[in-house]
Image: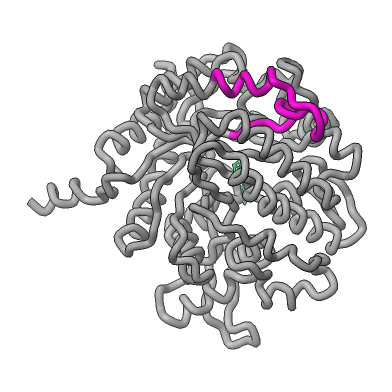
Amino acid sequence: QTFRGSLNSYKFPKDFFWGVATSAFQIEGAVNEGGRKPSVWDTFSAIPGRIKDGSSPAVACDHYHRYKDDIKLMAQLGVKDYRFSIAWPRIIPDGRGKVNEEGVDFYKRLLDELNKYGITPHATLFHWDSPQALEDKYGSWRSREMASDFADYATAIVTRLGDRITHWMTLNEISQFTHLAYGVDSQPNNAPGTRVSSKKEVWQTSHHALLAHGLGCQAIRAASPKPCAIALVLDIGSTVPLTESAADIAAAQKAFHTYWFNGGIIFPALTGAYSPIMLKELGADAPDIQDGDLKTIHQPLDDFGINLYTGKYARAANNPQGYELLDFPKSYPKMQATWIKFIPESLYWAIRHVSDTLGRQDLPLFVSENGCITQDELNESGEVIDSDRILYLRQYLRAAHRAIQEKYPLKGYFLWSLMDNFEWSRGYSDRFGIVYTDYKTQKRIPKASFNWYAECIRQNRVV
Ligand code: PNW
């Protein structure tokens, strides 16, 4: 009796959605087709040494030609929601100016195919692939001009695809294409990988991205022919209380302001102000903020997407800040990447911090990315038994379930990723998919986790 009870637990609400996520540059390939021009990632990848395994993103998963098969796989999986991104360099190849209708047509075909299977599209307007032309013209995110060019691109897209898409996300993970793409002391891992002279200049790039988000929201609302939902998607630095004592929880909430880039990105976007604690810590490195900027940045949102892979433990301490962040012991469990420490409750705490620490209990949330790398190999029977991935996803989904039990407004979950793809500076060596991509033949092989996830979706619970 008890056993049956536990098997029936971890049910999700009836309207909870289960999805998968990808991004344009990581899967499409066809970089010189359909009128597309280079992005900063095309340029960056061509520099020897920048991509770990020396691989080229030119073909990736060849999704540009194989999108029909890939959508069939999604239908087989049973997902009803798909998060993907639209490539700015396909739509406006020079970054600003003339719209390339051939680029738009690819997304029309993709959307019509999704529609055939009843899969709802959730489109990210920008997932790191800035047009190279804008990098050459004014240094892309180093310039304020990037924000208005992004808004014009948003208008161009929403005007053309707004009849087919009603779920929009502006930018994906601001920190990754600003703070981790422009460096002072070291060579950044992400494109354009530019050295700049001060930390202030780096903070200026993320400020410009926030402005792009704000102007982008206004552009989407103005251009959309239908009522639509607009979200921002950020990588949250999730501070996890070491114990759930009141003191450690308070410590984790304080630490949330300054850990990762939270205080300078998610705070202005969702509260209309940089965290004062963060600003104090930045001192002269803080960006210049013009009159009206914060108002532009702080747009009404319909929901908010959390990208979450890992976290950091915090506990109360007798020091001026009142908390300390803990280093991981060498033996701490991690996935096949050193950065993905296994901390399922980091997902629960990310949700709770966005709701409570930021005071945005009104804002519906969804997980826009969650997943991991495992050491995936085809066995003799041609299968990939990625048990570690199943165990990881199962625990993180249970943490999501806890948040829902406690009435946090979590509406859905996108697994990163549908299939193995071009993992940025790590090339093809890091595999995040629940479908194995054989890059020699472009054959797709569903992994054990694919079947497991299909069963979760079918039963609407963590199995
Ligand atoms: C995200 N970190 O990036 C991106 O949105 C995806 O395109 C990417 O493939 C995926 O996560 C997996 O890496 C991140 O070091 C990269 O904390 C690194 C970190 C976080 C997110």
Residue located at (81% from left, 59% from top): 204
How far across and down, in percent of the image, does residue 152 sit? 73, 40
Residue located at (50% from left, 46% from top): 229
Tag count: 0
Q: What sort of colour scheme is used for the picture?
A: one colour
Look at the picture and state if 46 lies above or below 249: above
Q: Can residue 148 be seen in this view?
A: yes
In the image, 304 versus 308, the foreground residue is 304
Residue located at (73% from left, 15% from top): 33
Look at the picture and state if 141 lies above or below 264: above
In the image, taking residue 434 as reference, residue 404 lies left or right, namely left
In the image, 449 versus 416, the foreground residue is 416
Q: Does the magenta stretch include residue 192?
A: no
In the image, 32 versus 210, the foreground residue is 210
In the image, taking residue 246 as reference, residue 192 lies left or right, namely right
Determine which quarter of the picture holds residue 105.
top right
Q: Residue furthest top?
A: 441
Q: Is residue 101 magenta?
A: yes
Q: Is residue 375 visible?
A: no
Q: Quadrant of the C terminus?
A: top left
How far across and down, in percent of the image, does residue 298 sit? 63, 62
In the image, taking residue 33 as reference, residue 162 lies left or right, namely left
What segment is highlighted magenta in the picture? Answer: 85-109
Determine which quarter of the picture holds residue 404.
bottom left
In the image, taking residue 283 as reference, residue 374 lies left or right, namely left
Residue located at (68% from left, 69% from top): 274
How far across and down, in percent of the image, does residue 460 sit? 28, 41
How far across and down, in percent of the image, does residue 18 sit? 38, 39
Q: Residue furthest left?
A: 1
Ligand 1 quarter of the rendering: top right
